[in-house]
Amino acid sequence: MAEIIAAALTSHAPLITGKPDIARPEQRERLYAGFHELGRRLAAARPELIVMFVNDHLQNFPYSNLPAFCIGLADDYDAPSAGGGKFMRIPPRKLRGDRDVAMALLEAGLDAGFDFAYSYEIESWDELSVPLHFLTPNGDVPIVPIYTNCAAPPLPRLRRCHEMGAFVGAFLRGHARVRRVALVASGGISHWVGTPETGRINPEWDQRVLDHIARADIEPLLTLTHAEIEREGGNGGQEIRNWVALLGAVPGWKGEPLAYEPVAEWITGCATVWVHP
Amino acid sequence: MTPAVSYPLNKVLTAVARQHAMKPALTDEDLAGHTLSDAERAALKTGDIDALYRLGANPYLIRRVFRARFTI
């Protein structure tokens, strides 16, 4: 049976790698140090597979077809593609998927009432490319991404995301083929992207989110409404659904924030959090 | 309450974003074959990011396509 041997939460933003020079150096270096520490701990845990809780930005799922939850069944993932890589300044690369595990998860979900969509082809934007640039620089660990709609309302409720994550955690612990699984969620914390308030960050809200996670006091996050998050965390804050989903897979585990920087130039409240029993 | 969504606007912006193209404004060529209101067409052709938001364009797509219009 598999064991969840590591879990991490990170922000993602294309400017983190795309324009490192515009950030204040001390902020950039503190955040990068948090990413590198996550990478070091993840490598030490020796995962065979990384299950990623992430979201699309209308790159793969347009308004003609928008799943609430979608499992990647691809052989490999562009993370990034040549086009995205130019903007994120990350060399294009393909990361291996694990279709056996992904398909088993999909089938188990459908049997249990989690009606995941699925996709055989996904072009990653920053949701996979940026965190994995730091966390798995060699790209040698296969991934199974689970996409949650965080970008095109109406969005799934946070409690449902948490329940989905709990299902994924239980599935993984009962899975026979893979023994050592890591979980990574990316997104958030507060940021306003493409709205008239673009550039706003709310460090107080970010700190509240981090404090709840540090105490494993998740319930108050599960009752947040779309409107509350939009007001306090911006449209980018809706991505904490990915974090909440991961935390559902590891009940009782607490977050250890390694870095938090409200980087105005990257228009994002950026964090890296190690999650452990 | 779900914000207002313009499917035609988002369809155009998705097509441009998928080419990894960033533009200060869209052209008649970009808009060919799309059914848009006069206000939507004008906002796309002038790169009016605030108007696009009000008209129901997804903010992530606004940012992707019209990045040059943002001051930050």
Image: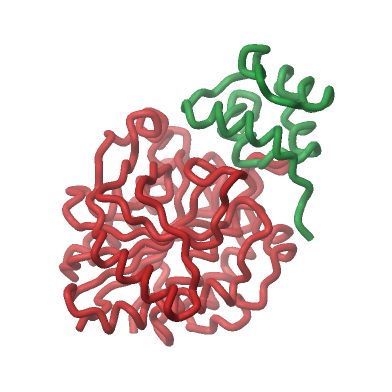
Residue A231 locus on image (x, y percent): 73, 59
Q: Is residue A175 visible?
A: yes
Q: Quadrant of residue A105?
A: bottom left
Q: Nearer the viewer, residue A155 or A225?
A: A155
| Quadrant placement of the N terminus of chain A | bottom left
| Quadrant placement of the C terminus of chain A | bottom left
Q: Residue at x 32, y 43 (%)?
A: A79
The answer to whether A179 appears left or right of A277 in the picture is: left
Given the current orientation, which residue lies at the most extreme right position? B38
Given the current orientation, which residue lies at the most extreme bottom position? A252
Q: Quadrant of residue A3?
A: bottom left
The answer to whether A53 appears left or right of B37 in the picture is: left
Q: Please, which colouring scheme is shown?
A: by chain
The chain coloured green is B
Q: Is residue A8 above or below residue A247?
A: above
Q: Nearer the viewer, residue A97 or A244?
A: A97
Q: Nearer the viewer, residue A245 or A261?
A: A245
Q: Is residue B13 above or below residue A223?
A: above
Q: Residue at x 24, y 64 (%)?
A: A100
Q: Residue at x 60, y 24 (%)?
A: B68
The answer to whether A173 appears left or right of A127 in the picture is: left
Q: Residue at x 27, y 84 (%)?
A: A174
Residue A91 locus on image (x, y percent): 27, 34
Residue B7 locus on image (x, y percent): 70, 39
Residue B53 locus on image (x, y percent): 75, 38
Q: Quadrant of residue B12?
A: top right
The hue used for chain A is red
Q: How many marks can you see?
A: 0
Given the current orientation, which residue lies at the most extreme top position? B28
Q: Is residue A189 visible?
A: no
